Image (tube, helix red, strand yellow):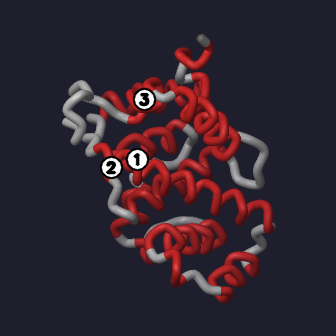
Amino acid sequence: MSFFKSLPDGAGPRTIFTAYPEIYKAWSEVSQAIMNGPSDLTPGERELILTYVVGAAGCEFIFVAHKEVAREWGIPEGLVEKLVEDFDSADIEPRMKTLLGFVGKLMVTPTEVTQEDADAVFARGWSEKGVHDAIAVTARASFMQKLVHGYGFVPLDKDEAIKRAKGRVEKGYVGIFPEFDK
């Protein structure tokens, strides 16, 4: 149940996006560009980043929804949970782990990110464009975290998260909102 009495049970971002299309149509287009547009990162890697940073920040709503999107893009089931529970022992390629460490710090303690943190990512071979894209994914995650926590949205159950993940992979971040075509 949302903090807003006017919203129905089961309300979530879709409820807000369709109520305020003058804002969220453009936001969905930006989200599509960030998550699925041209990048050094695959859409699956971007979903991994998004899911990891919201998990590290304790946002269950987005974590539950987007771990299923990441899985639909081929990220192994259980990997994101392991990264959040015990980052150091998670079995992931070192180059990606360094990038995830950087964006996790950016999400949870942004004022503590240093030149050394950025240098470590570049030393692993990430391009400035790739790091930019990871930062943009993290910024998007932060915005969405504030939205869902501000409204008090309740996380989806697993079956609904799986169903919506399939739609997000098939239709993208704009196509899941046919209301925007009106």
Question: What residue is rendered at 57% in x and 58% in y?
Answer: 139
Residue 24 position in % (x across, y down): 54, 34
Local crowd size for mark 3, using a 10 Å CA cut-off: few (<14), some (14–19), many (≥20) = few
Q: Which of the 4 image quadrants contains residue 122?
A: bottom right
Residue 115 drawn above or below residue 179: below
Tag 2 secondary structure: helix
Residue 98 drawn above or below residue 178: below
Left or right: residue 173 compared with residue 16? right
Residue on which disc 3 sits:
14
Q: Amino acid at mark 1?
A: Leu
Residue 79 position in % (x across, y down): 44, 56
Mark with earlier residue (2, 3): 3
Q: Which of the 4 image quadrants contains residue 131?
A: bottom right
Answer yes or no: do the residues labelled 2 and 1 have beta carbons within 8 Å? yes
Residue 156 position in % (x across, y down): 30, 36
Question: What residue is rendered at 70% in x and 57% in y?
Answer: 133
Mark with earlier residue (3, 1): 3
Which quadrant is home to the N terminus? Answer: top left
Q: Compute the Cα span from label 3 to label 1.
A: 11 Å
Left or right: residue 165 compared with residue 152? right
* Pick the front one: 43 or 75: 43
* Pick the front one: 28 or 126: 28
Residue on which disc 1 sits:
147
Front disc: 2 or 3: 2
Question: What residue is rendered at 48% in x and 57% in y?
Answer: 142
Q: Amino acid at mark 2?
A: Gly
Residue 8 position in % (x across, y down): 24, 25
